[in-house]
Amino acid sequence: MKFSRLVDQAEKIVETHQQGHSVGSKELSELQRRLTEKISHYQAKLEEADDPQKREKWQTRLKVVSAQLQKSKQLSVR
Amino acid sequence: MLKKILLPSILIILGYGFWVSPDFKEIAAGVSIFLFGMLFLEDGFKAFTGGVLEKLLQKTTNKTWKSLLFGIISTTIMQSSSLVSVITISFISAGLVTLVAGIGIIFGANIGTTTGAWLVAAFGLKVKISAYAMPMLVFGIVLSFQKSKYLKGIGSVLAGLGFLFLGIHYMKEGFEAFKGSFDLAALAVEGYPGLFLFAAIGAAATVVMQSSHATLVLILTALAAAQITYENSLALAIGANVGTTITAIIGSLSANVQGKRLAGAHLVFNLATGLIAIVFISQFVWAVDWVSDHVGIAQDDYTMKLAVFHTLFNVTGVLVMVPLIHRLADYLFKVFPEKAQDLAEPLYLNEAVIEFPETVLKSLKKEVWHLFDSAFELMAHGINLHRTEILESPDLEKTIADDREIHELDLDELYESKVKILYGAIVEFISQAQEHMPSIYAEEMFRLRKASSGIVECVKHIKHLRKNATRYMLSDNENIRAEYNRLRYQISMILREIYRLRNEGDYDHSLAILEIDELKAEIQLEHRQLDGRITEVLRDERITPMMATSLLNDFNYVDETSRNLLDTAQALLISHSDLIAEAAQEVVLDEDEIDDATTI
């Protein structure tokens, strides 16, 4: 393979990566709905928990799912 | 011993045959060209596989009637029930189709193979087929020199058909000339003994030629040349049907128990069908005459009548056997029971599927899960816990704190026998498969290889952890004991969670891959907490500096193991089963993103 072609391909890969993959709008809404549902579930668990360690655990999970939800909002829709 | 003398004996017999009879030479050459054509045909069809065939197989075999239809169509196209059987065995071994679906395909293949008799009877012996053979060969060979995979495939199919037709031509010529010098009819015996004798000859001929189709062509040509009587030919056709199972049996030798069951089903079906055909031969003869009258086949057109017979008795066999398909499957489960699982043996890697990329990936994924299961057991025992405790305990932390039983085991030996062998088989399979895999599968192959090496690393880390974990779980110092129990808990919890996510229902399974991120974040949290705790207990002299050093070293093993396990799980939980699962893959967080999210 020619070097210039290799560079072209690499650029395309980087471009795709930067733009992010696109997903169908129906699937994206369903994914976001489920993540939101999970966030509510963890919030309920957090409120129930008295033990500081357990609270920290639910807080961590909550933060991760929130970050995933945020990331999903940056995806481009097909 | 038998194997050693078999080939030289065959060669000597053939050589002698060629010496004494030029006609025999022509027939043998015809058979060879015919079989050569079948090889080309098989190669040609392989060019059109590579994902498509496997997907088609899954969608078209989920109901018995569908699998029957699949068997009929695929065998009609490929003109080889043996090829379809062997491919089905490989798929069943890879766990892609169920035994019942596989049996359905085999039944269908038996009907599909009868189209061969029709093709030969209707066209092969009425026209000078070599006239078609030559252009096909020329076009086929020209196309097979092309670079395009599909043109090559078409070329091989055309060349294959050309050779088949040419082979038929030579066999026909040979039999015409052979007529005066050898009389198969001399072997004729009246009644059932004769039927069984010719059935045995038909079976033997098929075993030798590895193709019932080739035998059928021989029968039809011999019949057309009046070498054998019509009744003899019926028995030969029955025998050919039984003989064809030998290819499937050979194919199943390298297959797992499922493949053996399918080969068993093939044998049972063909024996039962053959027996029915022999017992009710006079009824079949009457039915053949009746059908022939109604479709306008002449009374003395025995080649066409043989084709009718071949179809009738196979259709009868299917009609009789289809209602018994589940019973047959149950029976085969009893005859070929599942071996007590030896974890060191690969269960899903089958060389027969190596040219089918989708199947390769699915088999590999199953095998890596199998490696995970083996490693799970070793890791559990390595930290002095039972697998069932990890999976079933309602309060894992308490179970770990209470259970102070030491598991006597040689982890090095177990690693060699249960993990290393399996890992080696996976790596070897991947490198073999990569030769045939299109580049689009490279990333997934790499991920699966990395996942298996990750599992192996985990076991190695547990080997290092075991010494101190065993020592300190019995320690009188409750602080160090508690810390080591935390390490044991972390490994157990991750193993248990991965196991749960793997077996999650369809709804949750789509998001399983995202839950791994949460577990990764929990590990990071644990890492931060441990640092604080160690400083505290060391300052208060509740543990010695030596203990603290061991703990920090071992925590690194546990941390590494946890990350490897979670990365492995994430690689294995990637699912293309639905679009939600595919969307979920896009929001998986990387290590920095997890870090950012949890330190806010």
Image (cartoon, coloured by chain):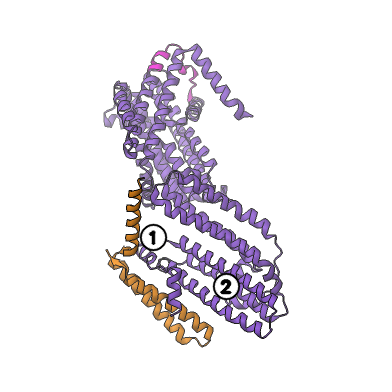
Chain colours: A orange, B purple
Q: Which residue shows up at 64% across the image and 54% down it?
A: B416
Label 2 vs label 1, nearer the camera:
2
Quarter of the image where the C terminus of chain B is located = bottom left
Looking at the rendered structure, the kind of residue marked 1 is Ser
Q: Which chain carries label 1?
A: B
Under circle 2, the secondary element is helix
Answer with left or right where residue B158 lies relative to residue B191.
left
Where residue B562 sits: x, y (%)? 55, 68
* Inter-mark Cα distance, 2 to 1: 30 Å
The residue under the point 32% across, 39% down is B150
Q: Give the range drawn in magenta.
A: B173-191
**With B487 as the anchor, is A20 left or right in this view?**
left
Sequence-wise, the earlier of marks 2 and 1 is 2
- Per the image, label 1 sits on a secondary structure element best described as loop
Label 1 sits on residue = B577
The answer to which image quadrant residue B218 occupies is top left
> Magenta stretch containing residue B308, yes or no?
no
Q: Name the spot of residue B510 as percent of width and height, x first.
A: 40, 66
Near-viewer residue (B262 or B517) = B517
Can you give x and y, in whole percent of width and height, for residue B448 in the image? Answer: 48, 56
The image shows residue B551 at horizontal and vertical percentages of: 64, 74
**B576 to B61, vertically: above or below:** below
For the point 35% across and 74% down, the residue is A70
Q: Mark 2 points at which residue?
A: B490
Residue B189 belongs to magenta span: yes
Q: Is residue B472 above or below residue B26?
A: below
Say whether residue B341 is visible. no
- Compared to B384, does B280 lie above or below? above
Say left or right for B27 vs B422.
left
Q: Nearer the viewer, residue A3 or B426?
A: A3
Question: Dividing the image into 4 quarters, which one contains the N terminus of chain B?
Answer: top right
Residue type at tag 2: Gln
